[in-house]
Amino acid sequence: MIGMSLLDVVAITGLPINPPDYTSDMQPKHQYTIASTTNSYSDFIAHNMGAEGTPVTDDEHVAFLFYWLNAIVFCSRSVQMSKFFLPLAALLHEENTLNLAKLLLGRIFEELGQFVHCLRDNCLISVGGPLWLLQLWLNAIFEKYMTKPGGGATDKQHIKGFRLADYKPNFPNTQSDEDRFWAVFSLFHSCKDFYNDNLNFAPFMR
């Protein structure tokens, strides 16, 4: 089976995969006052943001991490804050070592599984999850068909996601997103084995 691996996640994001301090039954050492029962992300920010010019409190930092995990990293399907990530935000605030790369990989497979389930049952598809990671991985797989902007080196060259984020699809004879989708589908469908001149299924192996 062809799919994203933990090595791919690490190469794209730069996240470490060292043994984590976190276990599934671990709880934060302290309680934090976070107004999470709001109707939207903007309401959440308004309720948890401190006054300008004042030091950032522990509660505000946990609230920031909570928002970051919901909206930026794991991209919750809901437009509301998911309490699922609140303990994780608190553990990060308390400087625990967490294997976020493994959590990201598990989350994206969970969301893709839900996506396939909706397609199979012909029900409404609610897109969510870290699809940005899937897009960057596909950019690496289809690098031969990407336009790569020129640019100077940065101090983050080891994080492949910075480079992949600038790629633009350039499939032959495609005009629309639908055309590009079918181009990708056709390339995958034409693969008979792991070794392929057009696709690189191990883009980060050197």
Image (spheres, rainbow, N blue to C red):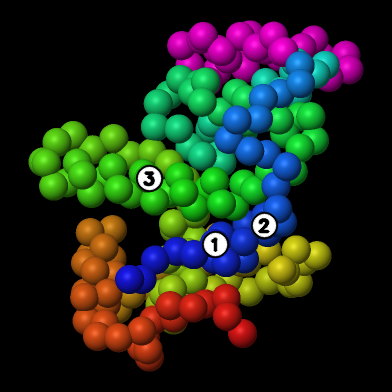
Please provide percent x and percent y for residue 39. Answer: 46, 11
- Residue of label 1: 6
Q: Is residue 109 above or below residue 22?
A: below
Q: Which mark is residue 76?
A: none
Q: Is residue 43 visible?
A: yes
| 95 left or right of 84 in image | right
Q: Mark 2 and mark 1 in contact (Cβ < 8 Å)?
A: yes
| 71 left or right of 114 in image | right
Q: Secondary structure at mark 2?
A: loop
Q: Amino acid at mark 1?
A: Leu
In the rendered image, residue 172 lying in the magenta stretch gets the answer no
Q: Residues within 10 Å of mark 2 (few under 14, many from 20)?
A: some
Q: Residue at x 80, y 18 (%)?
A: 58
Q: How many numbered circles does the render carry?
A: 3
Q: Residue at x 68, y 39 (%)?
A: 22
Q: Residue at x 33, y 39 (%)?
A: 127
- Residue of label 2: 17
In the rendered image, residue 38 lying in the magenta stretch gets the answer yes
Please provide percent x and percent y for residue 43. Answer: 55, 12
Mark-to-mark CA distance, 3 and 2: 20 Å
Q: Which residues are magenta?
A: 31-56
